[in-house]
Amino acid sequence: MRRVAVIATGGTIASESTDGGVVARRGGASLLGGSEVPGVEIEYVDLMTVGSYRLTLGHLRRICDAVRDVLGREDDRVDGVVITHGTDTMEETAILLDLVHDDPRPVVLTGAQRPGDAADGDGPRNLTDAVLVAAAPAARHLGALIVFAGRVLPARGTRKVHTTALDAFDTVVGGQLGTVDRSGVSLTAAPRRPKPLPRPGTSFDETRVDLITMYPGADDALVHASAAAGARGVVLAGTGIGNANPVVVDAVVALLGRGMTVVLSTRVPEGPVVGVYGQGGGADLVAAGVPTASGLPATQLRILLALWLSHDLTTVHPIRSLIDIYADIKED
Ligand SMILES: NC(=O)C[C@H](N)C(=O)O
């Protein structure tokens, strides 16, 4: 018998329809709808019951702590961990878990697109699949994974790509790692995983990193507001290959002068970020000292930056090397 701990955090998989809309309120033990996973003993940890659109960095840290606590137990050892989680921000929690994961046993995130009280819900199937992957010896050393709609995806580079489709996630960097169905788990690839970063401490909770998207007519108001609100970092999701405009570049230069960390990403789902264009484009930002990052979606880059800033790791990993090691990892 294998043993898996399921840490329940809420999300649609745990949600029911109420007069106030669909809300998360079910605990872990109810999420399989009474069915069992053959060959696996499951233990449930009810950590929180929160829709993932409401999560804070503090919640993400608590999820990390819960994984550490379960894997750190001397008695009662488990073979893997599953996190049930809302899909809206699963990619953020997944990358944080992956960045700090220092154990061969996998941590597998899953959820559902249909509420727990839907007649044709996808939650029980996804949870069964996630438990099978967490229990699989072949999933060891793969870090944090997202298992959804029968697909096994790496944490790094995976994002929610559809608001309602059951197959809601895709990896925008590299490919999927395998599949899972009633006949078992099939893993055909492994992600490259750098040395783990230190786990988030309580300082992570308050480390403000804003995500600012570019668009026609964008001015400097949001960049300045971010600094005024106490942000220590900004991920700029540029247009196209990573562009802003002259007004925003000027504002970014002012922020850099005040010690703010700014990283250039893109609002486009796939493709590299490169400083190519002048006149307010990415070439100007790069010339001003803003590093580009291509290997993580902007949402996940923000988590990497928050973790780095919260630990004051600047001397260990200057920002460019942090991005090279933990974001723009070269796949074979
Ligand atoms: N499908 C879902 O789980 C979406 C939900 N709004 C959440 O992230 O909690």
Image: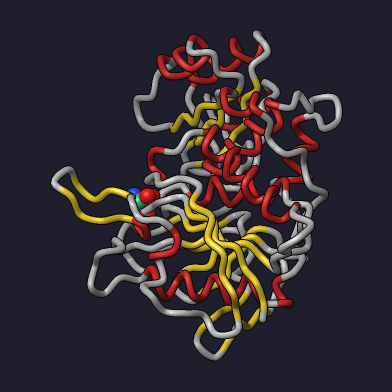
Q: Is residue 295 visible?
A: no
User: Residue 264, image x and y in percent?
Assistant: 59, 34
Furthest-right residue in view?
Answer: 316
> Could you say which is closer to the camera, residue 98 or residue 128?
128
Viewer-proximal residue among 249 and 15: 15
Residue situated in front as seen by the camera: 161 or 84: 84
* Left or right relative to 36: residue 141: right
Q: Position of residue 26 (x, y in %)?
A: 35, 55
Residue, x 65% and y 38% (percent of image)?
A: 304
Drawn side of residue 10 relative to residue 163, left or right: right
Colouring of the image: secondary structure
- Coordinates of residue 15 in the picture (x, y in percent): 31, 55
Residue 126 left/right relative to 96: left
Task: Name the image quarter holding the N terminus.
Answer: bottom right
Residue extending furthest front? Answer: 75
The quarter in which the C terminus is drawn is: bottom right
Q: Residue at x 78, y 57 (%)?
A: 103
Q: Is residue 231 above or below residue 296?
A: above
Instruction: Identify the residue at the far left of this view.
Output: 19
Which residue extends farthest bottom? 183
Q: Quadrant of residue 312?
A: top right
Q: Residue 158's image quarter?
A: bottom right
Residue 238 vertical position relative to residue 253 in the rendered view, above or below = below
Residue at image position (79%, 47%) is: 196
From this view, report whether residue 123 is shown above or below residue 107.
below
Q: Position of residue 133 (x, y in %)?
A: 61, 74
Horizontal side, residue 103 vs residue 215: left or right = right
Residue 241 showing in the rendered view: yes
